[in-house]
Amino acid sequence: MYQTNFQTKEELFQGVTKFLVDKDWATMEFEAALREREERFPTGLPSDPPVAIPHSDGTYAKEDVIVGILNEQPLEFYQMGTNKTTLLTPRIIFVLLVRDKVTHLDQLQRIIEKAKNHEFLTRLQAASDEAQFKAMIQEEL
């Protein structure tokens, strides 16, 4: 989802759920699961630039998908592991939707590792069009 214009993470959760449901990759309940999971366990990463990885368990997944999102403006996410004391403002968001728990953890760890790569994140933010953005995500993840 390239150059989206979500104003809040809640709008993003609604928009990405609609995108996934329209493709028959998730059920509508995924949105509520994202909200609940993010409330209990924030997913912002203090990378450079910052990234968020909202996800829930695989209950609402029909397919295994990583949705890369580049939002036009930064959104507010709390940093992972800080008990909501540190606010981050990522433009790059990876929404993880994986059915199997082991695969889910493997993919989550893979995204966290890629989020440490400043050059990769900078290239993502500078993507000139949706095709380039998508190709970079498919190549790296």
Image (tube, rainbow, N blue to C red):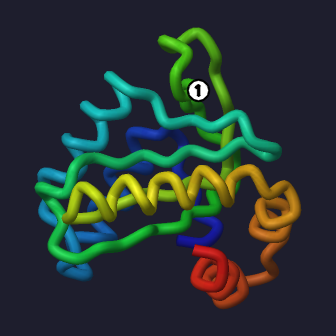
Q: How many marks?
A: 1
Left or right: 14, with 88 as reference point: left
Where's residue 124, x and y in %? 75, 68
On screen, 37 above or below 63?
above
Tag 1: residue type?
Gln
Q: Position of residue 102 (x, y in %)?
A: 28, 58
The residue under the point 67% across, 50% down is: 91
| Picture layout, residue 98 above or below residue 12 | below
User: Residue visible at 33% across and 58% down?
Assistant: 104
The quadrant in which the C terminus is found is bottom right
Secondary structure type for disc 1: loop
Identified at 52% across, 71% down, the residue is 1
Judged left or right of residue 136, residue 134 is left
The structure residue drawn at horizontal position 50% and vertical position 38%, both measured from the top left corner, is 8
- In the displayed structure, 127 sits above or below 97; it is below
Q: Position of residue 45 (x, y in %)?
A: 63, 37
Which residue is identified by label 1?
Answer: 79
How would you rate the neighbour count of disc 1 (Cα within 10 Å): few for under 14, some for 14-19, many for 20 or more? many
Classify 23 as above or below 97. Answer: below
Q: Quadrant of residue 106?
A: bottom left
Residue 79: % across, % down: 58, 26
Write down the quadrant of residue 118 in the picture.
bottom right
